[in-house]
Image (cartoon, helix red, strand yellow):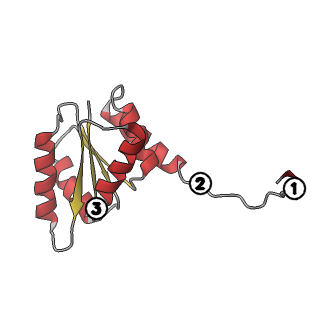
């Protein structure tokens, strides 16, 4: 199974995984990395590498990070650029994580990247308020 690592500024990565587990239950081969004030890229690279060594990463690693160009992305990029079977998706959100966790048993890494990309985009919606409401129906 493909490993999933969520890396974000602050504890967002830990909390979004807790939210996903509220919906999907406990997950295997998943971890989070936090970027805390005062830390640098080297610290993040070390955290990612330690987590990769604890996970079963034979089928690949999908990094899901918050911001393109942010420190969690940059540190993951250092690792992914040296490894064929690692990819990074930015803009992590709960629907994206749920789709990835639900699909990783039967998809390869490249397919999982597309699932993450599409589900992340598709989850963004707006409420249309221009609907006339019949007050008698309320």
**In terms of secondary structure, where does tag 1 sit?**
loop
Q: CA distance from mark 3 to mark 1?
A: 44 Å
Residue identified by numbered label 2: 125
Quick one: label 2, few (<14), some, or many (20+) residues within 10 Å?
A: few
CB-based contact (under 8 Å), mark 2 and mark 1: no
Alpha carbon distance from label 2 to label 1? 24 Å
For the residues bearing labels 3 and 1, Cβ distance under 8 angstroms: no
User: Residue 11: which disc?
Assistant: 3
Label 2 vs label 3, nearer the camera: 3
Callout 3 secondary element: loop
Q: Quadrant of residue 52?
A: top left
Pointer 1 residue: 134
Of the two numbered discs 2 and 1 in the rendering, the one whose residue sits closer to the viewer: 1
Q: Quadrant of the C terminus?
A: bottom right
Expressed as whole percent of the image width and height from the top left, the position of residue 4 reads 27, 42
Residue at 22% x, 54% y: name it. Answer: 76
> Distance from label 2 to label 3 (Cα)?
25 Å
Eyeballing the image, is 95 above or below 12?
above
When asked about the image quadrant of residue 24, the answer is: top left
Q: Earlier in the sequence, mark 3 or mark 1?
A: 3
Q: Position of residue 53 (x, y in %)?
A: 10, 42
| Residue 104 horizontal/vertical position (percent) | 34, 32
Label of residue 81 in the image: none
**Residue at far top of view:** 106
x then y, percent, for residue 93:
42, 53
Name the residue: 39% across, 44% down.
22
* Element assignment for label 2: loop
Task: Give the mark, 2 or 1, whose residue is nearer the N terminus.
Answer: 2
Q: Are marks 2 and 3 in contact (CB under 8 Å)?
A: no
Res. 113 in view = yes
């Amino acid at each position: 199974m493909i490993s999933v690592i969520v890396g974000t500024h602050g504890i967002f990565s830990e909390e979004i995984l807790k939210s996903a587990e509220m919906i999907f239950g406990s997950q295997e081969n998943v971890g989070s990395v936090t970027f805390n004030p005062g830390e640098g890229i080297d610290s993040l690279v070390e955290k990612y590498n330690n987590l990769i060594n604890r996970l079963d990463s034979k089928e690949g690693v999908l990094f899901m990070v918050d911001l393109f160009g942010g420190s969690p992305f940059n540190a993951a990029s250092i690792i992914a650029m040296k490894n064929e079977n690692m990819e990074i998706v930015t803009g992590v959100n709960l629907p994206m994580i749920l789709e990835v966790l639900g699909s990783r048993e039967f998809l390869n890494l490249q397919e999982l990247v597309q699932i993450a990309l599409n589900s992340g985009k598709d989850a963004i919606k707006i409420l249309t308020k221009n609907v006339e409401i019949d007050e008698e129906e309320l």
